Amino acid sequence: MKRVAMMMHLCVGAASVVYGQQQSAVSDSLWNVSLQEVEVISTRATRTTPVAFTNIGKEELQKQNLGQDLPYLLSMTPSAISTSDAGAGIGYTSIRVRGTDGTRINVTANGIPINDAESHTVFWVNLPDFASSVKDMQVQRGAGTSTNGAGAFGASINMQTGELVAEPSMAFNGSYGSFNTHKETLKLGTGLINDHWSFDARLSNIATDGYIDRASVGLNSYYLQGAYYGDHTSIKLISFAGKERTYHAWNYASKEEMEQYGRRYNSCGYIYTDENGQMHFYDDQIDSYVQKNYQLLFNHQFSSAWNLNLGLHYTKGDGYYQEYKDGRSLVEYGLNPFVLDGEEVAWSDLVRKKAMDNGFGGGIFSLSYKNELLNAALGGGFNRYEGDHFGQVLWVKNYIGMLEPEHEYYRNKGTKNDGNIYLKADYQLTDGLNMYADMQYRHIKYQIEGMNDKWNSVTNDGLQRLNIDETFHFFNPKVGLNWQIDRNNRLFGSFSVAHKEPTRNNYTDGKFYEHPKQERLLDYELGYTYANSWLNLGANLYYMDYKDQLVLTGELNEIGEPLAANMPDSYRMGVELMAGVRTDFGLSWDVNATWSRNRIQNFTETLYENEDASGAKWEIHHGDTPIAFSPDFVLNNRLSYQVKKFEVSLQSQYVSKQYMSNAHQEDHVLDAYFVSNLNLAYSFKLPFVKSATIGLTIYNLFNEEYENNGYAGSGFYMDNGERVRYNYAGYAAQAGTNVLGHLSLNF
């Protein structure tokens, strides 16, 4: 019966079975210690919550955590797609769920917000090897349950860290493979000391040359945790940090460039081509950032029914990206023209650095109550962000005159207060029938003051002045029913409302005197699951109705920057199907597929002559068009076989074509692709080693040539009095067949 209940829990949107966590034996003295993990558990969905979700356990993460970033470890999650700038899954990576990008995916660790307060996304490159410290994860699709931090329009990713291991432990994990990719992770744990204390540490180093030319990545990180476990109280102090140094690979390449220079071509940092046809690039075209995170988590169990969770947190970020720019106007950088060989030089090559110095901190809480019929929680949090953005000129070609070291040419500061409170309850109406209600109020105040880095090329009178002062009040209700029909069959339905404020870029790249509006989502979900001892099946229907969704329309702001405009009506609808089979002879099969239709209604595109904001405009009415980066079909498949200590698994993903703009242009398309990875692993015993595993993973087994990300743009020119449209696009090429060998030792 226990196994059946677990399977039913997993089937709700599960791409794969959540493997049971193997816990170390606990001594008799531990029976008097409450091992309640310190986590704001009210953010998690359960088997009676009418939400589509997938649980990913520690064992499943470990099997895939060989060096690639965390988004790639979620590649089997229904409706999920991962992307990589460097082409090998390490460095700047991202994840989309149901076609929504990272700015619309809420991410928390132990209930604490991880999304950047201004951009709303998670820069996974700043969390290197974080998966090695994650106990388990839950991915909720759609609006999900109320949580802290950014508004969830596509999904929520909730991570829990710090599994308690009772005995002292040490582990080493190492990988090496193609593109000089390597990973070294060392983990140490004291186990439980005096029945109450434990200390854990992790050090990680990850590096790769990247598939794309010069797309090198160097990542260092640590995770430190000290914990106290009492009879009814537990406290954790956690510190984790990441340092990254990454060569730019975000320009991507056009089809023409790939044909001329190869698929690995990278234009970032280009300086000149010499007389021998050899291209030269700037060595320090890099992104460098250090992010330090601190969490203090407190849990107290008043009784079997009442539980209190509190969390304090602070994140410090400091870094920059540096780049070579050719033929730049000196006045735009606060520099005076100079005279060289008797001629005035107003334009020159230079090196600039754009930097950030920011802090994000606050507190969260949840008070939960549970009895046989009711599971309720009152929670919320308050967070404050302060961030300085500034730019410096480090070098100017042939410059004559005084150039102050690290000459500053712009600076602005963003502040954001974000508070929320929610009340949610799951009540059993009758045997097998539960009603769910979730009410959240969220308040945001966002300000930006100072000079932007954008020169007003229309008025030519200086940098853009930022004076943003916006306040938002959001009410996000959610209701639903869950019906456990019998021990095998489950049916659920829900309706949710979600709101989302504009990002920093929506303001800085928007119109000067007309700010974007908030976005709203009405999310309808209907799901069914079946589970028995060897088979689990699931189906989830969704309709996501958007109001004022911010999308690129081709329109430019007053200084010629592309801006996102509010579209009155758009929607996403689809069906997610899941299946999993387990056999007694070691064979297992997991598959999920998503068919969807994603449309902007009555889309109007604006083109500019030669893409000049001050020139003539051409409005094109397209009717209903596909939403950018939203494939109609995604298929994930994994077939694995385990016999004794040997395991082999084949994981495949098919993604149908995607448009990279909302204008339905065939030369703005990411072609469909089908990629398979083969993993081989063998476990064995060694003296003084509890367990050892050696393996080999072959990525892109069939050497598929594909791209999983890119950009697109358009304009027009006049020819004999007729407007002629032109399109262009850049593509993020991904690596062909490549390998990674790996070794794991547990002491």
Image (cartoon, grey):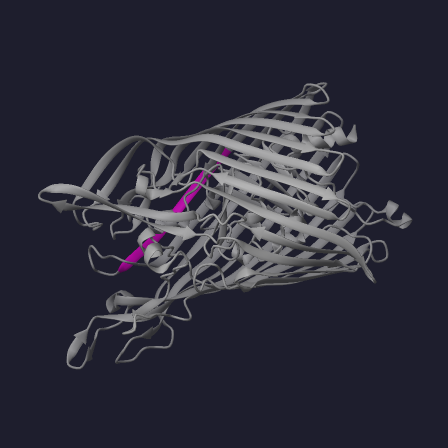
Estimate the x, y position of residue 464 in percent, counting from the top left: 29, 56
Estimate the x, y position of residue 277 in percent, counting from the top left: 30, 70
Q: Main secondary structure of the magenta part?
A: strand
Q: 471 or 54, which is in the foreground?
A: 54
Q: 117 or 131, which is in the foreground?
A: 131
Estimate the x, y position of residue 380 in percent, counting from the top left: 59, 41
Q: Residue at x 13, y 45 (%)?
A: 718
Residue located farthest toward the front when viewing the structure as drawn: 702
Q: 451 or 630, which is in the foreground?
A: 630
262 vs 152: above or below: below
Classify residue 304 by image quadrant: top right
138 vs 47: above or below: below
Residue located farthest toward the bottom when viewing the structure as drawn: 341
Count of marks overlaid on the render? 0
Asked if the stretch drawn in magenta spans residue 468, the answer is: yes
Q: 535 or 545, which is in the foreground?
A: 535
353 vs 192: above or below: below
Provide the residue span drawn in magenta: 463-475
Classify residue 180 by image quadrant: bottom right
Asked if the stretch drawn in magenta spans residue 271, the answer is: no
Apparent side of residue 640 relative to residue 327 in the rendered image (left or right): right
Q: Residue at x 67, y 46 (%)?
A: 648
Q: Residue at x 78, y 52 (%)?
A: 165
Question: Does the image show residue 216?
Answer: yes
Q: Quadrant of the C terminus?
A: bottom right
Q: Quadrant of the N terminus?
A: top right
Question: Does the image show residue 482?
Answer: no
Apparent side of residue 48 relative to residue 289 in the rendered image (left or right): right
